Image (cartoon, rainbow, N blue to C red):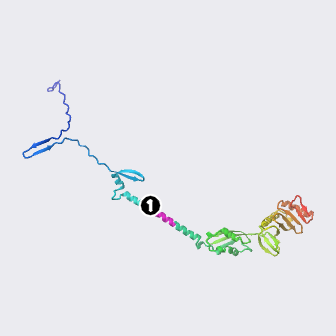
Amino acid sequence: MRRPGVPRNPKPKPEPARKSRPEPKKNVRTRSSNTIRQTTEKPEQTESPPRQPEKAVTRVDVGGWRRYFTQGRATKTFGSRSQPNELEGRRNELRRAKSRAVWTRVLMALSTLVVTATLIWVVFFSPVFAFKTDHVSVNGTSEEVSAEEVIAHVRPWAGVPLPRLSMNQLAQRVEEIVIVHTAAVSREWPNGLTIDLTLRTPEYTQYRDGIWEILDLEGVEISTQEDKPTELAAIELTGDDELRAKAIDMISAVRGEIDPGLAEQIDTYVSDGHAVEMRTVNGPLIKWGDSSQSALKSQTVLVLLEQRPSHVYDVSTPTRPVTS
């Protein structure tokens, strides 16, 4: 049912009017009793947000890299030009620390150098470790050589610090004593030496120039005496001095292999370094040749001495001996 008071066909609502552009300013004159006031009407405008000021940009070179900072960030990080900031203080502290480290290293190097130089002077040049002849111990002496004679050979080095002494040079000086075969020298800290001697052993005797020479296994003359030493084997070296040692080696090799019964009959061993001959107590001469096959030669000579008396026995070739 239709409500009372409502028309049968209601009219459509009118559309809202569109906003028109603001009209230009109008000068309105209001007349009053005394003055005429001019009013200016401004059109309505929408408010826009305030425009933010542009930020200043600062360029900074850091470690070869270019970095850009705003003014606020640059001030916060690096501080202003008028007042140093905390980072600048840290940089100064780092510089001081580096300087202290450099000086510390320099002082340590100088201290090490001074200590090293002092130690070198004390050990190698000061009298703290100087050699003293009254601190020498000699071992292996005998009637032929005394400790005083050995010490006299090393006395020229008295006062020299032990580290600067050559043990080989001192040993060679002690070995100049004829009876000394070898010498071993060692340091006895802080000022002494220990010398161990190995003496030459008499092995042979040789009659020359009216006197008997006492020789060792190397042919070195140890001493002399007028009477023949009966406990030593008599030898005669006929070769050059260069072959002296070789001749004695051949005689020693032969003596080590011949029969003891034959050795008792030998008066003198003769060698020139190439061959060996033997003069027996009874007079016959034995031509031995070199030191090879000495055992067989020894047996051959014993048989010949018993079965075929002769003046000369040549067994240089033991399988074909010759007598004359």
State whether residue 265 appears in this view.
no
Is residue 315 toward the left or the right of residue 196 in the image?
right
Task: Give how far across and how far down residue 173 sits, in percent.
Answer: 69, 71
Where does the N terminus fall, quadrant-wise? top left
Is residue 13 toward the left or the right of residue 262 in the image?
left
* Residue 50 colored in magenta in the image: no
> Which residue is painted at 89% across and 63% down in the image?
313
* Residue 103 colored in magenta in the image: yes
Bounds of the magenta segment: 95-111
Specify the quadrant of the image occupied by residue 199: bottom right
Residue that sits furthest to the right in the current view: 308
Task: Give how far across and how far down residue 108 sits, in percent.
Answer: 49, 65
What is the chief secondary structure element of the magenta stretch?
helix
Task: Give how far across and how far down residue 26 sits, in percent.
Answer: 15, 41
Q: Which residue is mark 1?
A: 98
Is residue 171 toward the left or the right of residue 77 in the image?
right
Q: Give the residue type at disc 1.
A: Lys
Q: Residues within 10 Å of mark 1 (few under 14, many from 20)?
A: few
